[in-house]
């Protein structure tokens, strides 16, 4: 089983969007039983909070339910618990490496790197543009799913 942790700053916008989009992708591809997918925050700012309403709206419009998800913080132990730790942008990656004490196994990657892009996914908490975030997250998750299917 491949274990994936999506990570952003607060775990209320981008990383839960990626978590539930990826769960939907592997479900539609008929390979959900091969994956365990979660999301977490690098900060403590929104711990316990529900998914942001903008993310909920985007997921709901695609028929994806995220009810019950609450923000949690990434821990050092997550490095051993997950095969892939996927950040949304460079500051997330930097914080993830700080939390884990480094990345000796090369598990920490940016989501859009799987789509061949070096750019980060903008935080809709600040931009208000949940559609642009949706497009980037969907592109990254589809590319990640392709990568993982080809890897096995």
Image (spheres, rainbow, N blue to C red):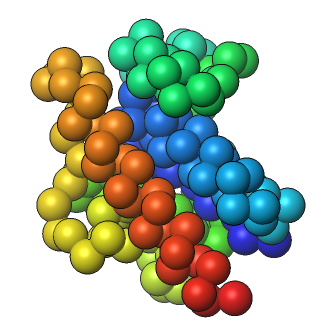
Image vertical order of residue 113 relative to residue 150, above or below: above
- Which of the 4 quarters of the picture holds residue 111? bottom left
- Which of the 4 quarters of the picture holds residue 122? top left
Horizontally, residue 96 falls left or right of residue 23, namely left
Q: Nearer the viewer, residue 58 or 112?
A: 58
Q: How many labels does the image show?
A: 0
User: Which residue is pictured at 19% across the width and 25% down the height?
Assistant: 129
Q: Residue furthest right?
A: 33
User: Which residue is pictured at 77% across the width and 65% down the height?
Assistant: 31
Q: Residue 99, position in %: x, y?
A: 46, 55
Horizontally, residue 146 falls left or right of residue 58, namely right
User: Which residue is pictured at 32% across the width and 70% down the height?
Assistant: 115
Quadrant assignment for the N terminus:
bottom right
Image vertical order of residue 64 relative to residue 136, above or below: above
Q: Residue 14, position in %: x, y?
A: 39, 36
Q: Can residue 92 be seen in this view?
A: no
Quadrant assignment for the C terminus:
bottom right
User: Which residue is pictured at 51% across the width and 79% down the height?
Assistant: 147
Q: Nearer the viewer, residue 106 or 62?
A: 62
Q: Residue 126, position in %: x, y?
A: 17, 23
- Which of the 4 quarters of the picture holds residue 134? top left
Q: Can residue 32 be seen in this view?
A: yes
Horizontally, residue 57 falls left or right of residue 26, namely left
Q: Which residue lies furthest to the bottom in this view?
A: 151
Q: Residue 118, position in %: x, y?
A: 17, 69
Q: Which of 112 and 97 is in front in this view?
A: 112
């Amino acid at each position: 089983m491949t274990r994936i942790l999506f990570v952003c700053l607060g775990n209320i916008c981008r990383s839960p969007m990626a978590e539930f989009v990826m769960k939907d992708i592997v479900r539609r591809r008929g390979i959900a039983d091969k994956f365990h997918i979660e999301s977490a925050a690098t900060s403590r700012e929104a711990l316990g909070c529900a998914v942001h309403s903008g993310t909920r709206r985007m997921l709901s419009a695609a028929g994806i339910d995220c009810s019950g998800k609450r923000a949690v913080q990434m821990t050092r132990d997550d490095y051993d618990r997950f095969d892939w730790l996927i950040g949304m942008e460079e500051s997330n990656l930097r914080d993830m490496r700080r939390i884990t004490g480094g990345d000796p196994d090369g598990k920490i990657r940016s989501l859009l790197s799987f789509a061949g892009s070096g750019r980060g996914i903008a935080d809709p908490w600040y931009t208000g543009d949940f559609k642009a975030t949706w497009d980037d997250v969907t592109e990254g998750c589809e590319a990640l799913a392709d990568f993982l299917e080809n890897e096995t």
